[in-house]
Structure formats: C-alpha cells, structure tokens
C-alpha cells in the first residue's frame, strides 16, 4: 500500500515537472533574417528571394532594395563586397553585383 502511494506521488511529480518545462517560442512571422554576411552568393540569393517575393505580392518590381526592407520582405540589405554595388536588372528581374562606378 505504501509502495503504491510512493509510486503515485513520484508519477505526479514527474507529470508536474514535465508540464512546467519551458515552452519553445515559435519563430516570428516577420521577414527572414539575413544570411551570414560575407558570402556574395548567400547575399545575392537572399536579395533575389526577397525581390521575387516582393514582385509576387505587389505585381511590380521594387523601386530599390531599401523598399524590400521598408515593406518587411527582408530584414536588411547586406553590405556588398568592397568595390561593388548591388543593382536591379529589371529585364532579368535579378539583383546583381556590379563594380562600383561602372555604368548600369
């Protein structure tokens, strides 16, 4: 009888402890976080994915990359590699890297 009571109390403690565990917080529904900066391929993929999402949602290309941030499609524009700048090629619908100071 005492053994049953002890087992019952232990089982109750285990159930209470399991219910008190810290719950995982679901990810926010905001813009995806930027990739690890430093990889041009990751950064271009991130920007082009945001560009496509914006274009599908708004039925037009963004005016510039900052519009992707203001419309909460991406968290921020990653810095381009030194000596380069991001450009939007409206014909192909892609964000590309171009040497800074070169004509578009």
Image (tube, rainbow, N blue to C red):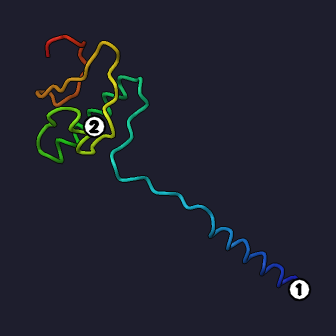
The relative height of residue 28 versus residue 16 in the rendered view (above or below) is above
Q: In the figure, residue 21 lies in which quadrant?
A: bottom right
Which of the marked residues, 1 or 2, is nearer the chain's N terminus?
Answer: 1
The relative height of residue 70 versus residue 27 in the rendered view (above or below) is above
Residue under the image location 18 percent in, 48 percent down:
57
- Dot label at residue 49: 2
Residue under the image location 11 percent in, 27 percent down:
91
Residue 89 percent location from the top left of the image: 15, 25
Report the Cα–Cα distance between label 1 and label 2.
64 Å
- SS assignment at label 2: helix
The relative height of residue 13 versus residue 65 in the rendered view (above or below) is below
> Which of the pair 101/11 is nearer the observer?
101
> Which of the pair 49/66 is nearer the observer?
66
Q: In the figure, residue 26 lies in which quadrant?
A: bottom left
Mark 1 residue crowding within 10 angstroms, few (<14) / some (14–19) / many (20+): few
Residue under the image location 16 percent in, 37 percent down:
62
Q: Which residue is mark 1?
A: 2
Residue 73 percent location from the top left of the image: 27, 43
- Location of the C terminus by quadrant is top left
């Amino acid at each position: 009888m005492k053994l049953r009571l002890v087992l019952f109390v232990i089982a109750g403690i285990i159930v209470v402890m399991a219910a008190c565990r810290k719950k995982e917080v679901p990810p926010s529904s905001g813009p995806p976080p930027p990739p690890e900066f430093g990889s041009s391929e990751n950064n271009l993929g991130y920007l082009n994915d945001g560009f496509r999402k914006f274009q599908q949602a708004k039925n037009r290309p963004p005016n510039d990359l900052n519009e992707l941030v203001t419309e909460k499609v991406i968290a921020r524009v990653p810095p381009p590699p030194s000596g380069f700048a991001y450009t939007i090629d409206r014909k192909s619908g892609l964000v590309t890297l171009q040497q800074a100071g070169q004509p578009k």
